[in-house]
Image (cartoon, rainbow, N blue to C red):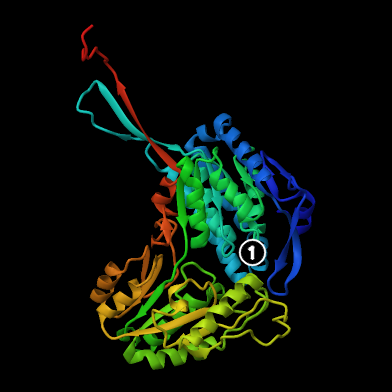
Amino acid sequence: MADSTELQVRGTIHAGGEWRAAVSGAAREILDPVDALPFALVAEGDEKDADLAVAAARRAFDEGPWPHTPVAERAALLRRVAGLLLRDREELGLLESRDAGKTAEEGRVDIDCVADAFRYFADLVAGEAPGRVVDAGSPDIHSVVVHEPVGVCALITPWNYPLLQASWKIAPALAAGNTFVVKPSEITPLTTVALIGLLTEAGLPAGVANIVTGPGHTVGARLAEHPDVDLVSFTGGLVSGTKVAQAAAPSVKKVALELGGKNPNVVFADACATDEGFDTAVDQALNAAFIHSGQVCSAGARLIVEESVRDRFVAELARRAERIKLGRGTADGVECGPLVSEQQRAKVEAYVESALKEGAVLRSGGKRPEPSAERPEAGYFFEPTVLDRCHREMRVVREEVFGPVLTVETFRTEDEAVALANDTEYGLAGAVWTADAGRARRVAGRLRHGTVWINDFHPYLPQAEWGGFGRSGVGRELGPAGLAEYRETKHIYQNLAPKPVRWFAG
């Protein structure tokens, strides 16, 4: 696998089977969020580079072998890629840690999940029937519904889980027989670049997998509007996702959007009736809000806790939040890394400031930590923050912060809990904590969110569809529905004994 020095030499744009620099010659420094120092140099592509990559993908789809490659061979290639990912797990995990700021262990877990995604879609397509027979009511008619690849896919991925989110798009796109151009975030592109190298090593034909590193307003915008692109899959913020949908609309492309979330974590008092239950609910609330410094679309950033246990719950939550160790993700004992950029930290700081002005009570964090050997002053660190006494009118409660900020709201009744949890423009994910099995099923059934966890938070299964309601997006990733996003459905109706119909005189 290439290191950062090789990346600088060969360029990070891959089109038609060749690595190269940007047409303009422009390059971008990739900064380590721990100390704000550059550690890699990538090509800064633009619209011209996007056009070249789309042209390569178009040729590979229209003229190349991949769309017609037998399913068993496509599945075998995906399994080879999974093996290569696990072979390079340590190196890729550390690269993900340094690029995105997460802990090294989080990076390693991400690579395991990426390999799982490739294996899952390999198994899914390998086990499918070749088509669904439709009974036409006559022995002379053979009618079948088959699935075919969409064509050229533009895959635009976010900065928080660079390789994991790329795999959720790339694996099903390849399994279905498509070609693609992926545009990773310009902030965290390195592991996606490495994945393209692994796809090549696994034997993927030239032109099937293409990557353009560069900013969203040039590369991403061009991919979304490009007439030779058949599908756009985007994961990111609501504003950018809206622009992608608008750009894709004139050519009526298929569009899949996985956008923001403002996810409720509802804790009923009966979940805290025992010491073990209380400790588990607090621990999972910390995990929900602060893993990867809260830079997770499904983060449980809204704690909605029953009033009778609120004081005890928030006190313990704040005590433990203050003990979270911040630093470089590869250092021993570090539990949270920095935010991804100075811009992201400034955004988080602005949300905390507005919350305090609107009446929130700061229980922990709320500021930059004191510099140390593990936390250089130039790094983008921000303390895990608990804001109590919050209400729905606050910006910090309504809008996606995407940082280590947890807001606390309270309820008295089940109906009130459901109303608060559903009182959001988003509908990505949520959780319910209760010892009452009947209540758990009732509340989960009433929540308007694409994923609902009961007595847990954050796990996902490759076999289960992932997506949201409301302004959290359209389309699904993972599971059979995730594969279906990358397919067209064709009905083939064959008349085995054709006869004149004589509708018209002649």
Relative height, residue 321 to residue 395 (above, below): below
Residue 249 at x, y percent in the picture: 46, 45
* Frontmost residue, 100 versus 91: 100
* Frontmost residue, 18 versus 246: 246
Which residue type does callout 1 highlight? Glu
Give the residue drawn at x 65%, y 49%.
212
Left or right position of 99 against 38? left
- Is residue 503 shown to the viewer in this render? yes
Residue 123 at x, y percent in the picture: 45, 47
Give the residue drawn at x 49%, y 77%.
289
Residue 487 lies in quadrant: top left
Location of the C terminus (image quadrant)? top left
Left or right position of 505 against 300? left
User: Label 1: which residue?
Assistant: 96
* Frontmost residue, 185 versus 272: 185
Are there few (<14), some (14-19), or many (20+) residues within 10 Å of tag 1?
many
Give the residue drawn at x 67%, y 88%.
370
Residue 152 lies in quadrant: top right
Relative height, residue 413 to residue 329 (above, below): below
